[in-house]
Image (cartoon, rainbow, N blue to C red):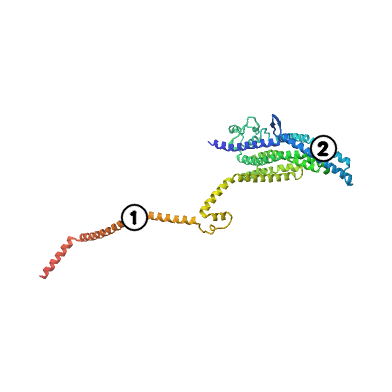
Amino acid sequence: MFNWFWNFLYGISKSMYRIIDFLLSCANMLCGIEPIKYQGVETDFVSFLLSNQNVTYGFVGAVLISVVLTGIFGVAALIKAIVSEKSNMTPSQVLVKVGKTLLTFLFIPVCLSILIYFTNVLMQTLYMSTSGGSSDGLGRFLAGAFGQDALKSGVSENFYLSESFDYTSTGNVRSYVDLTDYDYFFSWICSFCIILSLGTALLSFIDRAISIVILFIFSPISISTSVIDDGGHFKLWRDQFLVKFLMGYGCIVAVNIYSIIVAAISSSNLQFFSNSLLNNFMKILIIVGGSVSMQRMMALIGNLVSSGAGSNELRDTAIAAASMRGAIGGAGRFLSSPFRAVRSARNFVRDAKQYGTFSTIGNRLGFKTDRDYGVMSNSQLAQNRDLMREREKLRRQSNASFFGGSSSVQKALENGKKGNAQGGGGQASNANKAEGKKDNPIVNNAIANSMKKDKGDKK
């Protein structure tokens, strides 16, 4: 009877699982875990950007500039080696370092290609090993993890790894689990936290790709300074490149590890407290806390490369996100400016008619006018007079409709007087009738007999 209700609840869960899979697919392509195709050839996104023809032109131009800078820095280092007695390098060592720097320009593209390839292979292996055994996305694993307490008899715990399992089909899921016992609440909390973290990370992935291209183009310029600073600027460039390159992978791997931990925490066999309400609250606290920590996973990976580099990167990302929100808000205000201008002009015209032109201008400029002190304008006075006239007219109409005019009043008064006179006569006749009713023949006979008796006695 209530199958539609459980289907509706699972529909919410599977929709969130699909969103997670979509976000992960985009993030994995931006990171290089999943390949992209360009002209029928599979490659990763970063390699595609670095091998772009226009990016190559920019790199060649930077190399030419760096060759000139290397010559200038080499001459300065030679002069310092010849003139200064405290110099740590001889002129021959300076020339060898200049030669090494020029050769390094040629090996930069090759070294970056090798680094990207081996890093992608390493991270793909790490990603697959932390995806819960699911080969086609995290949604399949989450759908199976939160259904462990609702397994039907004879169903394996790893049912979600079966090729016939399809978490997007409610009917298919019903053949494995009992939807009345599915962990909907925990699935929603976990899915929401993952969606929020991935949505935030996707913005940083775009910044990461652009930053890597910029670092690639400017790499020869940083290397050219190795002649005079012993590779100080090149070390700074190297740390920046590795931080940008590895931080994206850190977030994706952190999402997988977080999902495995949440699946273990949400199991009904794990008991923190005997009170079920307190036990569930503890689990929710761990799930939400883990989602907050995922925001710092990229900084953790970056700090492993260079001390403080990941934290600085995370802070820069937060500043960029705030600037982006401000830019979006400014764009919205710019697009709505014509409508706001029309509304302001219309309101000004109406205020000018109501309060006067000078009063409206002064009020818009921030000055206090008669309007602020309760003084009414000519328009307001005219409106008040019209209102009073309308009220008086309505009062007269109501009186006329109630009394029916002056002639009706006089007729009503005359009818009232006649009624009073007739009322008086009627009262007199009624009194006479009442007295007549009082005449009794027995009493009258008794009175007559007594009078005759008195007359007889006198005789």
Q: Is residue 459 left or right of residue 14?
A: left
At x 51%, y 53%, the residue is 354
At x 52%, y 55%, the residue is 355
Q: Is residue 31 visible?
A: yes
**Secondary structure category for the residue under label 1:** loop
- Report the number of discs: 2
**Secondary structure category for the residue under label 2:** helix
* Quarter of the rendering containing residue 264: top right
The spot of residue 292 in percent (x, y) is 67, 44
Q: CA distance from mark 1 to mark 2?
A: 116 Å
The spot of residue 439 in percent (x, y) is 19, 61
User: Of 438 and 453, which appears nearest the observer?
Assistant: 438
Q: State the mark number for residue 269.
A: none
Q: Is residue 319 left or right of residue 448?
A: right
Amino acid type at image mark 1: Gly
> Contact (CB < 8 A) between labels 1 and 2?
no
Count neighbours of disc 1 (C-alpha within 10 A) and say few if under 14, some if 14 to 19, many if 20 or more.
few
In the image, residue 135 above or below residue 320: above
* Quarter of the rendering containing residue 311: top right
The spot of residue 335 in percent (x, y) is 60, 44
The spot of residue 225 in percent (x, y) is 81, 42
Count neighbours of disc 2 (C-alpha within 10 A) and say few if under 14, some if 14 to 19, many if 20 or more.
some
In the image, residue 273 above or below residue 397: above
Q: Say which residue label 2 marks.
A: 102
Q: Is residue 125 visible?
A: no
* Quarter of the rendering containing residue 26: top right
Q: Sequence order check: which comes first, mark 1 or mark 2?
A: 2
Amino acid type at image mark 2: Leu
Q: Say which residue label 1 marks.
A: 405
Q: Residue furthest top?
A: 40
